Every structure is written in structure tokens, then in C-alpha cells.
């Protein structure tokens, strides 16, 4: 039941994240994601061979009791900046919609869990706790201000025009290298990214999980 709970949470996390990107793009005037079938709650259309597979593996490890912090990404939602009224601002809004949807889902799962806990509903605990952990993980990971993550576009969106242009060039060139460096284990066997996410998720989980 615990493994099933993690699988359900995994599917919900990546689906709501990418569907939120597509919904925001469509709301801001760009129908591209909708035309590509990304405005969907079908998790299969949002699967990314690298990022989602990594998230799936880490999720299974967590479900089997191996201490890991699940992080990864789904298939990026493509949109056309030419269809947006303010490309710089709207690109940031489209990007932040994904992490916000994950945070909202984790809070909703926490609210339901607090209601059901006095009833001792084990099945709800097995599903809702993974939902909280995975959605927090996906949101925090994607808010890191580095390309190709959502945080990179959000970061560019809040900078002045000149600084945004220079930062965008830098992050497009070195963002992935920086991200890989943060994910690489140190001498203690734990990556800086895992340490950071463990600290943040652990702190938030104390408030969200009864």
C-alpha cells in the first residue's frame, strides 16, 4: 500500500505541475501547450525520459525505505513568447505556475490528512504523506534559480531588462553544469542539493504532516 501511495503521489505531482504550466500559458494568450496536448491531466503526456525517470527511481527508493529526497522534472511545456503580451513577465508567470500548483497540492493533502488522522485512516496516510513530500520536493527543486529549471525563468523575469539579458545568456551556457555540480555527492556522500532540500522539506513537513 505504501508503494502504491508513492506511485499515486508521483503521478499527481508531475501531472499537476505541467498542467499548471499549460493552463497559465493558455490563460495568458498562448494556445501552443493546449494544441500540443499538454493541457491534460494524463501523466503519460508529461513524461520526460531523464528528469521524470530520475524522479521515479528516487521515489521508488524512498518507498522502499531508502532515505532519499525525490527531485527531478517532467517534460517541459513549450510555449511561444510571441503570443504573450509581455514575454519576459508572462514567461515567469508560466514558470512559477508549476511550483505553486505543487505547493497548493501539498497544503491540500495536509489539510485532508489533519482531518482524517483522528479517524486513524491508514490508507489516507499512505497516500497523502507521499503526496506532501513529493509535491514539496518538486516545487523546491524547480524553484532553484538555474536554467533549465522553472526558477531560472522566474529569476530572469524579475530582473531589469539589461541584467535579465546577461543573466539569461550566462544561465543558458552554464546552468546545467551548475545544476550537475549541486547534484554531485561530496566527500560525505551527500550532494549540496540533497542537503539543502532535506533541510527545507524536513522543516516544512513538521508543519504539514501531523
Image (tube, helix red, strand yellow):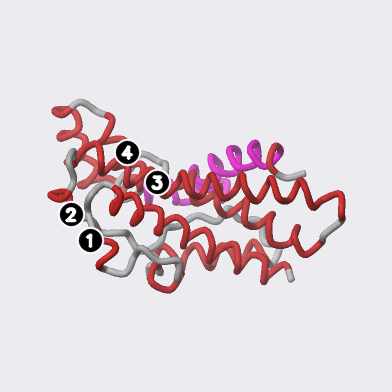
Decide which of tag 1 and tag 2 comes sooner along the chain: 1
**Residue 97 circle label:** 3
Q: Residues within 10 Å of mark 4 (few under 14, many from 20)?
A: many
Q: CA distance from mark 1 to mark 3?
A: 16 Å
Query: Element at badge 4?
Result: helix
Residue 197, percent from left and from top: 54, 43
Residue 53 screen position, x and y as percent: 46, 69
**Which of marks 3 and 4 precedes in the sequence?**
3
The answer to whether 154 is drawn above or below residue 53 in the figure is above
Q: Which element type, helix, strand or loop, lies under badge 3? A: helix
Judging depth in this view, the residue of 30 and 1 nearest the camera is 30
Residue annotated with mark 4: 154
Q: Residue at x 56, y 50 (%)?
A: 105
Say if mark 1 contacts mark 2, CB within 8 Å: yes
Q: Secondary structure at mark 2?
A: loop
Residue 80, numbered circle: 2
Identify the mark nearer the N-term, 3 or 2.
2
- The disc placed on residue 32 is 1
Residue 202 lies left or right of residue 143; in this view the side is right
The magenta segment? 179-206
Crowd tier of the residue under label 1, counting other residues whose Cα lies within 10 Å: few below 14, some 14–19, many 20 or above? some
Of 202 and 180, the residue lying toward us: 202
Amino acid at each position: 500500500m505504501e508503494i502504491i501511495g508513492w506511485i499515486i503521489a508521483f503521478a499527481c505531482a508531475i501531472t499537476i505541475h505541467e498542467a499548471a504550466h499549460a493552463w497559465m500559458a493558455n490563460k495568458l494568450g498562448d494556445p501552443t501547450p493546449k494544441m500540443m496536448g499538454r493541457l491534460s491531466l494524463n501523466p503519460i503526456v508529461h513524461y520526460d525520459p531523464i528528469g521524470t525517470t530520475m524522479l521515479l527511481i528516487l521515489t521508488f527508493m524512498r518507498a522502499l525505505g531508502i532515505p532519499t529526497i525525490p527531485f527531478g522534472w517532467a517534460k517541459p511545456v513549450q510555449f511561444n513568447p510571441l503570443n504573450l503580451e509581455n514575454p519576459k513577465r508572462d514567461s515567469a508567470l508560466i514558470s512559477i505556475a508549476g511550483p505553486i500548483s505543487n505547493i497548493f497540492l501539498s497544503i491540500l493533502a495536509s489539510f485532508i490528512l489533519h482531518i482524517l488522522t483522528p479517524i486513524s485512516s491508514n490508507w489516507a496516510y499512505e497516500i497523502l504523506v507521499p503526496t506532501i513530500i513529493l509535491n514539496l520536493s518538486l516545487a523546491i527543486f524547480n524553484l532553484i534559480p538555474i536554467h533549465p529549471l522553472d526558477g531560472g525563468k522566474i529569476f530572469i523575469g524579475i530582473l531589469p531588462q539589461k541584467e535579465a539579458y546577461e543573466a539569461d545568456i550566462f544561465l543558458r551556457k552554464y546552468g546545467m553544469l551548475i545544476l550537475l555540480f549541486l547534484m554531485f555527492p561530496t566527500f560525505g556522500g551527500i550532494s549540496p542539493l540533497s542537503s539543502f532540500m532535506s533541510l527545507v522539506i524536513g522543516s516544512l513537513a513538521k508543519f504539514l504532516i501531523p
